Image (cartoon, grey):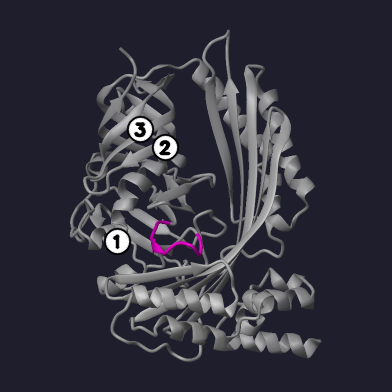
Amino acid sequence: MHSRWTAAERQAKRLGKPLQDGILPHYGLSTRLKCYAQIMGISQSFFAQRFGLSEHDLESYLGEALSSGGEYADLYFEYLANTSIGLDEGIVKSASEGVTLGVGVRVIAGERTGYAYSDDLSPEKIRKAARTAARIAKGPASIAKTGFEEARKHNLYPMIHAPNEAGLDERVELVKRADAAARAHDPRVFQVQATYADSLRHVMVATSEGRISYDRQPMARLSVAALARENGGAPQHGYSGGGGRVTLDFFQGEKSPEYFAREAARQAIVQLGAVEAPSGEMTVVLGPGWPGILLHEAVGHGLEADFNRKGVSAFSGRIGEQVASPLCTVIDDGTIGSRRGSLNVDDEGVPTQNNVLIEKGVLRGYLQDQLSSRLMKTASTGSGRRESYQHMPMPRMTNTYMFAGESDPEEIVRSVPKGIYCATFAGGQVDITSGNFVFSATESYLIENGKITRPVRGASLIGNGPEALKYVSMIGNDLKLDEGIGICGKEGQHVPVGVGIPTLKIDRMTVGGTAG
């Protein structure tokens, strides 16, 4: 037994893999060897053990994909187990568990991409998908390399037990606790909805360049919505939630069901006393954390490489130019441990990175996937993402945020004689070509004579992403990432993301309000 463990250690060292000190050595040998499966070659991988896939099979499928020509091909295998639980009116009204699996085959020939997928992992079905993709992307011939080398990757969410491996009763208890806490917060709360969802995704990516990547991706999220009403008036809504690539223990700590429930109830109660929002151009202060969704939508999407190689983004051809206030540095970082938007490798098998997009107001680069980086003759930034095996990858954000500044948040508010403070947002829309956006603020307040005063309802922010960043005049020292609820939509695909900002002062922005 001891010699087998030593062999595993030697193999890990030979491949340059970390031994994960402080995590694995505390568990038994069989568990440790199981955790080392990802560094022991395809024969020990999830897909080899579950479906009998071999290196020879992968080479054969890639050869089939390139049979009609093409310069690059890859295979994306996915096995996704998910659970969801919904509670409404104090009753668990829905609970489901399911599994989806399949493989996507992609062939790239210049600007042309062929893509086909199968939800059946039998050899004949995979070959059929490979031939279909090959015919779509017909181009100059290429040959797949023989043999595979495992790609470098991170270890951002090490865990022995994923959240969906816990008992169902434990997860049902989370939504029950949330319901009880929201109702106990204030008697004006009359309706509560609590949902819990988790998943465990196994992926394997094999490429015609001889690279192979594996990942085991856990996810969990708890959400609470509350409605409050006073004296027969209109009901007001509050929402909170969080999670990430975490174990179930995450919800037993500070970010408990009670924490999210009380926050949702608090927001609903605040809105009961809100006045109608003013309108017009004014100073806007964004609170830290979730308001970073404005940065994500109004700026981040415009920095994705597919829009820029097509020349349809407001940021196209502007690398090296001043596109924001010198106070602004914008980062997209897929390497933050356990965060919702983080990945050990992206959905093309490339390790995620910490990418500087805007540095002190100067545009430094775009988010690149394999296709765009080939066409733009640069390197992938580990930003190729897809919703599932049924979808082609495209450049997408991971965790997008702005660096903290030096100002005290209270000082920022004191500097505003008249304006609006936005604490949370709902949805928004952005036009990539022009950069114009509209966002709805779900919790906002008037700033009067340097103080946050009355809550307002019905406020929306209207502006232009690049222009808005030019008017950033103060940045707080309180950078905060969101709680872990973000879902980003693009071309019909939805992927988990993270956002964050410190407190920001924007000197000029149009507020759309409902006040007369």
Of helix, strand and loop, which mostly describes the magenta segment?
loop
The answer to whether residue 373 is left or right of residue 55 is left
- N-terminal of the pair, mark 3 or mark 1, is 3
Query: Which residue: 53% across, 11% down?
Result: 233
Q: Which residue is mark 2?
A: 427
Q: Position of residue 240 (x, y in %)?
A: 56, 36
Mark 2 nearby-residue class (10 Å; few <14, some 14–19, many ≥20): few
Mark 3 nearby-residue class (10 Å; few <14, some 14–19, many ≥20): many
Q: Nearer the viewer, residue 166 or 17?
A: 166
Q: Is residue 85 visible?
A: yes
Where on the picture, by quarter, is residue 94?
Answer: top right
Q: CA distance from mark 1 to mark 2?
A: 23 Å
Contact (Cβ within 8 Å) of mark 3 with mark 2: no
- N-terminal of the pair, mark 1 or mark 2, is 1
Asked whether 390 falls inside the magenta stretch, the response is: yes
Q: Which residue is mark 3?
A: 285
Highlighted magenta segment, given as a residue range = 388-397
Q: Which residue is mark 1?
A: 306
**Which amino acid type is marked by label 2?**
Gly
